[in-house]
Amino acid sequence: MVIVSVEALTHRYGAKEALRGLSFRVRQGEIYGLLGPNGSGKSTLLRILATLAKPGGGRAAIAGQDVVTQPREVRRMLGVVFQSQSLDRKLSVTENLACQGWLYGLVGSRLRKRIETVLERLRLEDRRDAIVNTLSGGLRRRVEIAKALLHEPRLLLMDEASTGLDPAARLELFDYIRELRDSQGVTVLLTTHILDEADRCDRLVLIHEGRGVTEGSPAELKAGVRGDVVVLETDQPAEAADRIRERFKVEPVFADGTVRVEIGDGHRFVAEVVEALPGAIRSVVLHRPTLEDVFLHETGVPLC
Amino acid sequence: MLVPAGWLPVAALWKRELLRFKREKARVVGFVGSPLVFWAVIGSGFGDLGFFFPGALTLTVMFSAVFSTMSLIEDRREGFLLSVLVSPASCGAVVLGKLLGASSMAWLQGLILLVFLPVAGLELALSQALSLAGVLFLIAFSFAALGFAVAWRMDSTQGFHAVINLVLFPLWMVSGALFGFASAHGWMSWLMRLNPLTYSLAALKRLLGSGLEADTPSLAVALAVTLACGLALWLAALLAARGRWTGGAA
């Protein structure tokens, strides 16, 4: 079943086109990622899905309800974790959750039960009475997620939800998300520009300049890049690229002052290229394609 | 919990303001303290604490109410407002919750000031005290609505201060709080008659029986104008917030 359907969505801020015909679909129970550099239109898309902005053209629907014409119905189904904090810092964890519950029409014993459930799920039981101001960044993020999940949304939108977290806390956060999906069947749509997060999504769409470039599971996307990736650091990248083009019949790409080559037999190429360019190479790196390579392969520009 | 579903979001935002207020004791002291000092100094200077009491009461309530709604700007900056805007709560509920939160705090501060009635040499029967409380709440609600309508469009608290002070002080000064109709000449007395706050203050003066003059509007007129202004400002706050698509979030 399709939970999110986005069709040919456009949006502009004045002269700047933030979205130029973005389309994709998210199925029930998926963890779906939007991967793209800052300014690629990810946050704009999330604002439209959260009914905070109207699209210029195209259509977006959550479980069949149009975000423009049925905002109330859409809001009921959504849990949103923003890039910025949305908690009241002067209130305790429980007070924040209770306020959120009332906003969504939850009261009394039902509300208390839900608060217990989300506190337990996000392992916040022993922090229930702490004032948000006194919590660490990682804990606050967990409270944000607890808040977004309180009314049992069908779809969780997360805009760069791991912002400000250290790598360990980021991985932990993702484990929570997985757990949620597995235990509750919650669908998650998240934006990220961080590779290890994108790698953990079920499916991804790569976004560049307001358009979807390519879509698929991380493995499928990586399979689209042929063989291995070899990155050479050299003092004369242009010269080295010419020699490689001539001898190996491949098209090297320049990125961040390095020469990148996508090639089938990486290990053989490394041996040969070091022989062919004696003394000119400062370092050679050989690796399996990453999502960053996929992005570069598809768009010609680096992800970050 | 005996709150109908549509009122729950109102109650949610209302309660939030109360909880915040409870944790900011400095605000309580500041809002009650400064008008008290003002009243004591000016009232003693002129040797008439009774005349300046309604003015001090108004000053407390209006400033407290307006500056409570300033938190709207922080709510936006800190992101809290964003989570309210993506909730199913209606625009009207969000406005009302915020206004009730701000005005009930201001109202309580006004009520605290009533402790000083005997010092001002004034007396109050219970029925008058209840009416007085009602008028104070109306004043609080009106100024909370004014603050809301301005704060919704502002992105800095400094800007809010500048705009609000420009409006609040002149309004208060020519409302009969500092001088009566008798000592106002020509256009100034007309300005007083045009100032809506003159009527709110007149209602307080009538109920307290202090600073009354021949030209002081009757209680009925004073109440009618106060109520009408309150409704108009509430409408202004609602209209400001209706632009949530564009003005909603940073």
Image (spheres, rainbow, N blue to C red):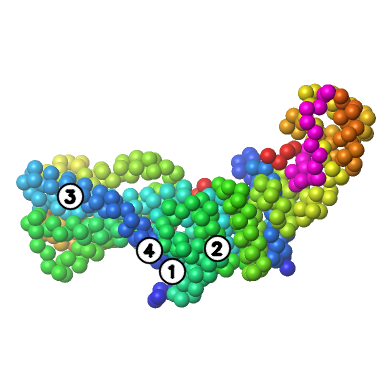
Residue A137, percent across and down? Answer: 51, 50
Mark 4: which amino acid?
Lys
User: Which residue is drawn at the image coordinates 17% and 46% (left, top)?
Assistant: B37
Position of residue B180 relative to residue B234, above or below, is above
Position of residue A149 relative to residue A235, above or below, is below
In space, the residues marked 1 and 4 are separated at their CA atoms by 10 Å
Mark 3: which amino acid?
Leu
Please tell me which residue lies in front, A41 or B146.
Answer: A41
Quickly name the residue at label 2.
A122
Q: Quadrant of residue B167?
A: top left
- Camera-near label (3 vs 2) is 2
Quick one: label 3 or label 4, which is nearer the N terminus? 4
- Camera-near label (1 vs 4) is 4
Quickly name the residue at label 1.
B8
Crowdedness near tag 2: few (<14), some (14–19) or many (≥20) residues, C-alpha within 10 Å: some
Quickly name the residue at label 3.
B36
Tell me which segment is drawn in magenta.
Answer: A279-300
Task: Say whether residue B124 is left or right of residue A94.
Answer: left
